[in-house]
Amino acid sequence: MSKVLADIEKEIARLTIEERARLIQHLIESLEPADEDKVDAEWERELLRRSKDIEEGTAVGTPAEEVLDRIHRDLR
């Protein structure tokens, strides 16, 4: 472990729970894509495409009961 990381860990240990929670949130957000709006727009297009396929009857669905049965089988 680098000295810088060890120093940071020592400083983090001095923080309150609330401060550590804020730090964690900040770190998680820093790992998310920088262009989140673009990702959101792409998901929106995908959802609209899938909805259209369902409405037009071109989507191939699987009944929920069958999906749940498969999940239960795989978990055993």
Image (cartoon, rainbow, N blue to C red):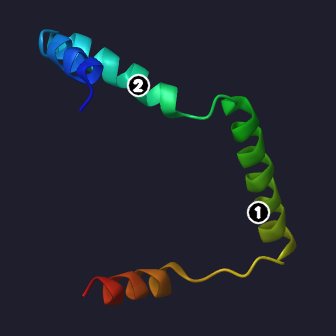
Front residue of this view, candidates 2 and 24: 2
Front residue of this view, candidates 73 and 10: 10
Q: Which mark is residue 27?
A: 2
In the image, residue 60 sits, relative to residue 22, either above or below, namely below
Q: Position of residue 59 (x, y in %)?
A: 77, 76
Please name the amino acid that badge 1 sits on: Arg
In the image, residue 22 sits, relative to residue 72, either above or below, namely above
Residue identified by numbered label 1: 50
How crowded pointer 2 is (Cα within 10 Å; few <14, some 14-19, many 20+) is rated as few
Please name the amino acid that badge 2 sits on: Leu
Count the labels in the image: 2
Which residue is located at x 73 percent, y 54 percent?
47
- Could you tell which of marks 1 and 2 lies nearer the N-terminus? 2
Q: Which mark is residue 25?
A: none
Which residue is located at x 24 percent, y 20 percent?
3
Query: For numbered disc 2, what is the local secondary structure?
Result: helix
Query: Does residue 4 appear left or right of residue 67 in this picture?
Result: left
Q: Position of residue 66 (x, y in %)?
A: 48, 87
Query: Does residue 10 appear left or right of residue 21 in this picture?
Result: left
Front residue of this view, candidates 22 and 5: 5
In the image, residue 76 sits, relative to residue 56, either above or below, namely below
Q: How far apart, in angstroms, are the residues tagged by discs 1 and 2?
A: 33 Å
User: Nearer the viewer's eye, disc 1 or disc 2?
Assistant: 2
Q: Position of residue 68 (x, y in %)?
A: 41, 80
- Residue 27: image quadrant is top left
Front residue of this view, candidates 21 and 64: 21
